[in-house]
Image: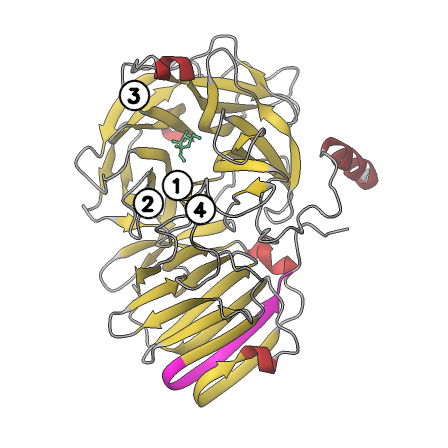
């Protein structure tokens, strides 16, 4: 049985060329498509032991173009199999972002002969209407699968939610609201969120609007998400709203609101602006549906400022590491923390532990460990009373520094000298993120891939994602400081490439 499953899985997935995934800058522990352009994660749903990841995909080029839904599957969110394209553009337009749900009660009637339907809810973007200057060219549509996500059929009654005349009317994220046995759609509608509800995914009624005067508004609101997390035994609702520009370090970024949702309205806890990731390179992040009490978030690992121009070869752009979201309390705030899913541990290959390093200004990890290998995970426990930076470098003196600045109580990532940066004027920059924890002990965890670093500080309270493109891969790691360092612990673990399992 096991063998049968794996043969059919391999047959379903398209051929994987041996040299593929070994190109310069190719992420080794992050999902990227074999070829061509991707943007937002879409339709993420867990069903029958499989994590589905759909994504905005242009199969004919390395820049944004007519959008399809590409598809990949995984048993663990770490190793991915790229599948045939799930949804192609049609007479109603391109297939823009959206979500997918498991219709367990067959509310839609798409389930047949006892087979549960997966239903995708997405935006049809009509480029002709856009070119004509109309304002109703984005409409919400459905597609379904009754073979575990392998093949998809578009609903003949599309679109199911028509545009009332709002240019930006897109990216439906749908969830089952159990108390009222109805579906709730969270939709980005220009400068606010509009909630709709439906008994069957086909007929939608407007519930309420949120956010016209709240949160960050420099860019258009896109790719929202709504879900609850456990907060000391109570439900706290989280509403994610991605924003096209005006992020904390310029460009696109993921903000969120905390509050209560009653099936009709979202009532925010306060008027604070919060960001799930302060780095420049996480966007359009949303969560998987049907994962029970776990809430797992995945973002697109770049920024609209330069996503079309990064110097990759046959593919362009990748996803972040999947992250588990939790509510954390600080002395005076509530935060959604994000940490790599525990499944990432399975690709760690051997761990080196170094403890109690003191009275040193510069600590060269490359000298302590025979050969530093990238990708890797690096966990550091250190005293928050010293400034320090973890510097990734190559012998061409190209480097990226991930640091902590105690006076300003902030983290930073400096990629001004990281390698190739001239493809866009904003790329060579130093980026900052606040430290929320006031603990004396500071723990940081870095997921370092060939062309990215993700910083998870204080158990995921501050997160930064940053890409870089050195002319030659980095092969050194140093911890530098002007003061004497007191490092309690360093844990270094190389990570196996997710593309070389067999
Ligand atoms: C966000 C976004 C979405 C849209 C999609 C188009 O990055 O602009 O709002 O649906 O990309 O590819």
User: Is the residue indicated by label 1 positioned so its CB lies within 8 Å of ligand 1?
Assistant: yes
Most frequent secondary structure within the magenta stretch = strand
What secondary structure is marked by label 2? loop
Mark 1 vs 2, N-terminal side: 2
Tell whether label 2 touches label 1 (CB within 8 Å): yes
Q: Which mark is residue 304?
A: 1
Q: Which residue is mark 2?
A: 251
Residue 391 to residue 197: above or below: below
What secondary structure is marked by label 4? loop
Mark 3 vs 4, N-terminal side: 3
Q: Quadrant of ligand 1?
A: top left
The percent coordinates of residue 312 (x first, y second) are: 55, 47
Q: Which mark is residue 302?
A: 4
Residue 367 to residue 93: above or below: below
Instruction: Say if residue 236 shows up in the picture.
Output: no
What secondary structure is marked by label 3? loop
Residue 376 to residue 198: above or below: below
Q: What stretch of residues is rendered in magenta?
A: 481-495
């Amino acid at each position: 049985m096991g063998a049968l499953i794996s043969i059919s899985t391999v047959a379903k997935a398209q051929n994987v060329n041996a040299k593929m995934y070994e190109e310069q800058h190719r992420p080794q522990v992050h999902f990227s498509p074999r070829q061509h352009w991707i943007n937002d994660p879409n339709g993420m749903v867990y069903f029958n032991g499989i994590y589905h990841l759909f994504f905005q995909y242009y199969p004919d080029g390395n820049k944004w173009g007519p959008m399809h839904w590409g598809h990949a599957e995984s048993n663990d969110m770490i190793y991915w199999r790229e599948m045939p394209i799930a949804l192609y553009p049609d007479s109603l337009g391109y297939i823009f972002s959206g979500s997918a749900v498991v219709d367990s009660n067959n509310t839609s009637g798409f389930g047949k002969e006892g087979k549960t339907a997966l239903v995708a809810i997405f935006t049809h973007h009509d480029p002709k209407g856009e070119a004509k200057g109309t304002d109703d060219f984005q409409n919400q549509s459905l597609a379904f699968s009754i073979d575990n996500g392998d093949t998809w059929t578009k609903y003949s009654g599309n679109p199911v939610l028509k545009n009332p005349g709002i240019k930006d009317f897109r990216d439906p994220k749908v969830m089952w609201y159990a108390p009222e046995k109805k579906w709730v759609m969270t939709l980005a509608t220009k400068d606010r969120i509009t909630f709709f509800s439906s008994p069957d995914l086909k007929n939608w009624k407007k519930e309420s609007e949120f956010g016209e005067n709240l949160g960050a508004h420099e860019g258009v609101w896109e790719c929202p998400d709504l879900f609850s997390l456990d907060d000391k035994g109570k439900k706290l609702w989280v509403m994610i709203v991605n924003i096209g520009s005006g992020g904390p370090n310029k460009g696109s970024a993921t903000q969120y609101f905390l509050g209560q949702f009653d099936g009709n309205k979202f009532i925010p806890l306060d008027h604070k602006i919060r960001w799930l990731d302060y780095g420049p390179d996480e966007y359009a992040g949303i969560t998987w549906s049907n994962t029970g009490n776990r809430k797992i978030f995945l973002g697109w690992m770049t920024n609209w400022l330069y996503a079309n121009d990064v110097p990759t070869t046959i593919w362009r752009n990748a996803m972040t590491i999947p992250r588990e979201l939790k509510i954390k309390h600080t002395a005076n705030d509530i935060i959604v923390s994000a940490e790599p899913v525990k499944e990432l541990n399975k690709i760690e290959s051997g761990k080196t532990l170094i403890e109690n390093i003191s009275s040193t200004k510069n600590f060269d990890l490359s000298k302590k460990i025979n050969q530093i290998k990238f990708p890797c995970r690096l966990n550091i426990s250190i005293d928050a009373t010293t400034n320090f930076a973890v510097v990734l470098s190559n012998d061409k003196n190209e480097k990226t520094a991930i640091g902590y600045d105690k006076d300003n109580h902030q983290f930073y990532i400096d990629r001004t000298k990281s390698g190739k940066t001239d493809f866009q004027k904003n790329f060579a920059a130093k980026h900052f993120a606040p430290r929320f924890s006031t603990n004396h002990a500071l723990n940081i965890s870095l997921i370092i891939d060939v062309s990215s670093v993700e910083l998870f500080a204080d158990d995921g309270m501050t997160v930064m994602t940053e890409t870089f493109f050195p002319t030659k891969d980095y092969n050194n790691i140093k911890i530098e400081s002007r003061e004497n360092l007191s490092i309690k612990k360093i844990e270094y673990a190389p990570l196996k490439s997710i593309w070389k399992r067999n």
